[in-house]
Image (tube, rainbow, N blue to C red):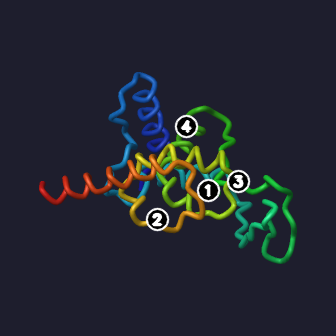
Amino acid sequence: MHSWHHKRSMLNRYHQNLNTGNHALVLTGLASQYRYAGARILEELIERTASTNICKYWINRSADGGDIMEGGKNLPVGEFPSYLISENWPDNELVSLVSDYIAWIAPSLLTLQHLSKEERNRLEGYLHVQAISVEHHWHLYPEIMDEKKLKAARVQCRLQKTGSSTS
C-alpha cells in the first residue's frame, strides 16, 4: 500500500502535467477501466478528512431536494452534495481531483433522479470521458438534456469496443 506522501506525490505530478498542457496525465484512466485511476488517492483524502468522525447513514432525497437521514433527521436543501461528494476542498489540486472524478463517473451520476437541468448539462458534457460506461447506464437516465452528446458518447463507445476487439 502506498503512503500518503507517495499518493500526494502522484497527485502533484498529475497536476504538473495538467498545468503544462500534457494531457497524458498520470491519473487518466483507460476507456475500458471500471475504476477511476485516482480512486485510491481520493478515498484516502476523504478518509483523512473525515478522520475518526466517520458516520455512515442512509440518506433519502425528497422531491424538494432536501435530504432525510436514516432515523428521520432532516437535512437542509443543499446540505448533501448533488454528486454525492463535496466539491469544496482547501486547495485547487484537490478540487481538480474531485472534478476529474465527477467527470469519470458522470455516466453513473446521470441515473440520479434529483439532478437539476444545469447539473445534468454539466454531467452530459463529460460523457466522452468514460463513454464505455454510457452504454450500461443511458437507458436509466430519467431525463436527457442534449441528445447529441449522448449519441456521440454511444458512438464513441462502439468505436472503442470495435477498436479493442480488433487489436
Image coords of residue 134 (percent x, y) = 42, 59
Residue 138 versus residue 151 in the image, above or below: below
- Give the crowd class for mark 1: few <14, some 14-19, many >=20 residues within 10 Å: few
Q: From the viewer's perspective, is the residue at label 2 or at label 4 nearer?
A: 2
To which residue does mark 2 refer?
A: 137
**Residue pushed farthest top?**
20
Q: Earlier in the sequence, mark 4 or mark 3?
A: 3
**Residue pushed farthest left?**
167
Q: Nearer the viewer, residue 51 or 46?
A: 46
Q: Are marks 2 and 4 in contact (CB under 8 Å)?
A: no
Q: Distance from label 4 to label 1 (Cα)?
A: 18 Å
- Give the crowd class for mark 3: few <14, some 14-19, many >=20 residues within 10 Å: few
**Mark 1 is on which residue type?**
Glu
Image quadrant in which the N terminus is located: bottom left
Q: From the viewer's perspective, is the residue at label 3 or at label 1 nearer?
A: 3
**Mark 3 is on which residue type?**
Pro
Residue 66 vs residue 92: left or right?
Answer: right
- Give the crowd class for mark 2: few <14, some 14-19, many >=20 residues within 10 Å: some
To which residue does mark 3 refer?
A: 81
Tell me, for residue 96, which label it has, or none.
4
Q: From the viewer's perspective, is the residue at label 1 or at label 2 nearer?
A: 2
Q: Earlier in the sequence, mark 3 or mark 1?
A: 1
Image quadrant in which the C terminus is located: bottom left
Q: Distance from label 2 to label 4 (Cα)?
A: 25 Å
Residue 130 vs residue 53: left or right?
Answer: left
